[in-house]
Amino acid sequence: MTTTRVAAVDCGTNSIRLLIAELDPETGGITDLDRRMIIVRLGQGVDRTGRLAPEALERTFAACREYAAVIGEHGIAPEHVRFVATSASRDAENSAEFAVGVREILGVDPEVVTGDEEARLSFTGATRELAGGPVAAPYLVFDLGGGSTEFVLGDGEVRHARSVDIGCVRLTERHFAGSEVPTLGQISAAKADIGKALDLAAEEVPLTEAASLVGLAGTVTTVAAVALDLPSYDSELVHHSRISLEQVREVTGRLLSATHAERAAIPVIHPGRVDVIAAGALVMLSIMERTGATEVLVSEHDILDGIAWSVLG
């Protein structure tokens, strides 16, 4: 068996993640050697200012220095490293400053991918292992990030894709900033914002035609872990769990009515997600209601896995 060792970095609005993996192109197998995440909140204030904040850049560069050391320990050549940057760095006026810093630290250029490419990478990462598996095709995959959400409909191939600007950080900053517990008016405004974004997504992606709904990224996996009432986060239990619409509705209501301290006391919520998870859950619930899905298949494999596969072309 001939495998290739690669490193994939996904730098989003809220977190930066690293995957070092062995890929087997013949079997489609992917073996994790190291998978880690750091909350850096690169998108801090971007929706309001249009710029990456200096402190957000420094947090991100510190994480890049840690990842560079790990990549070096695994002996991965630069040609087998891919760094993909998504929503926040697409939107920022000073994205060149970000690119220069990443290049100096990691020796590779960050690729600021389009929303459509982001969607395709997410679809590949989530569905490559689903053929003949737990749910039926076609799949509607949604990747719920900090600044944007990608929707992709397909089976073995992508049929339709669209990225829209709703995410847990963006919605929190727009509608819930400064509120310990969101008011009914704030929740209503956020729902209206989500509804408009879903209307845009529906112009390109038929949202009600899939046999299975597949949800990706930290908001989705966290909501699943809360719904499963796990005492601590367990990726093996979360991966390919099926969470019902009623469970998502209950968790969303609980998070929206909780104080910051009450959310922080839920053991499966990462400290870096405590202030944005309620808005993210509201997006997830709205997606399920719009699509008519009675359950969502939760996947731990997402754009990061798609980036890893893309290294091999």
Image (spheres, rainbow, N blue to C red):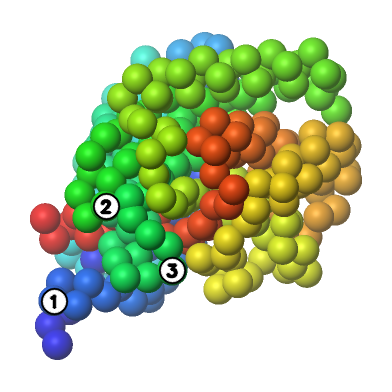
The one of 131 and 211 positioned closer to us in this rendering: 211
Residue 110 place in picture, x, y as percent: 27, 40
Who comes first in sequence, dot 3 or dot 1? 1
**Label 3 residue SS:** loop
Residue density around tag 1, few if under 14, some if 14–19, many if 20 or more, within 10 Å: few
- Check the image and report above or below for 3 versus 307: below
Compare marks 2 and 3 and give the one earlier in the sequence: 3
Measured as percent of width and height from the top left, residue 238 is found at 59, 65
Q: Which label belongs to residue 155?
A: 2
Vertical comparison of 161 with 63: above or below: above
Look at discs 3 and 1 and give the one toward the viewer. Answer: 3
- Give, as a three-letter code, the residue at label 1: Glu
Q: CA distance from mark 2 to mark 3?
A: 14 Å
Amino acid tagged 3: Pro
Mark 1 sits on what residue?
26
Disc 2 + disc 3, Cβ < 8 Å: no
Quadrant in the rendering for residue 178: top right
Residue 248 placement, left or right of 46: right
